[in-house]
Every structure is written in structure tokens, then in C-alpha cells.
Image (tube, rainbow, N blue to C red):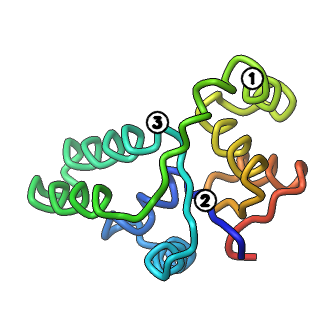
Amino acid sequence: MKALVIDGSTALGFLMQDEQHPDALQSLAIIESGTPTFVPAHWCVEVANGLVMAERRKRASQADITEALNLVAALPVIEDDETARRVGSDTTALARQYGLTIYDACYLELAMRRGASLATSDHALAKAAKAAGVAIFPN
């Protein structure tokens, strides 16, 4: 695999004890093995929001969320600096074409531009990625 793009659902799938999924854990192993892993600029905010919402719903303790946020900060992911510049063109076109949110279309656009596989547990995003010719991780 040349590169990987991970979305918030994948990150939450390896960060949250009650959501851990083998595919998400496998993506974490790939990231930690040194495969170039890209995320759009909003990824960290999206993941942090998901973690705080889990804390509010009593699915995790404050200590658990702090630990997860520290792991997020330490992950060797590359925040893409072109995502925001493409929102008004490529990303919006993908959102319209595939019926995605702009947030999800950012992941698709990034994977397409980087020639990367996409790790997601979001069914609509995975379906759109397949239709656009983007490999889903794991295959």
C-alpha cells in the first residue's frame, strides 16, 4: 500500500474501547508501521468531538478520553494542507456527486489526490469511494 487516509470513524474504532473493530485496529498497526497516513485538517477536531461526546454519554471516563487524545496527538499522521483550498471545487463536486457531507467528501478527495487507500467504517463514504475507484482498507 502506497498511502492511507483514515477518517474519524476509523480513529474512533481504535480509540474507543467499546467500539474497537479489527479493521480499525489493523489500520492503527499500518499507521504505526510507517505507512504514510494522511488526514484532512478537520480530522483531529472531528475525532476529539467524538471522544468528548462519548465521555458525555458516560461511555468513557475523562481519563480514558485524555489518554485517547494524547494518542491522537502522537500518531504519525500527515495533516493535509490542501484540503481547505479544494473545498470550493473538487470536494464540493464529490459531495454533490455521491451525496456525501463536505466532511466526508474531504476524505474521498484526499484519498483520490494522494492515490491512497481509504480506511472508513462509514458505509456511504465507502460506497462512494468504491464508485470513485478508491481502494478501501482493508481490501
Find disc 2 in the rendering and name its residue. Answer: 121
Mark 1 in CB contact with mark 2 (< 8 angstroms): no
In this figure, which residue is indicated by the disc labeled 3? 42
Say the numbered circle drawn on residue 92: 1
Q: In the figure, is residue 126 to the left or right of 16?
A: right
16 on left or right of 108 = left
Dot 2 lies on which element? loop
Looking at the rendered image, the disc whose residue lies closer to the viewer, 2 or 3, is 3
Name the quadrant containing residue 23.
bottom right
Q: Earlier in the sequence, mark 1 or mark 2?
A: 1
**Which quadrant is home to the C terminus?**
bottom right
* Image position, residue 55 (x, y; %): 20, 48
Going by the numbered disc 1, the residue's amino acid type is Thr
Q: Residue at x 46, y 59 (%)?
A: 77
Q: Tell me the amino acid under the disc marked 2.
A: Ser
| Residue 106 placement, left or right of 112 | left
- Residue 136's place in the image compared with 80, above or below, is below
Q: Which percent across, then down, holds residue 22?
A: 52, 80
The location of residue 48, given as percent across then percent down, is 31, 44
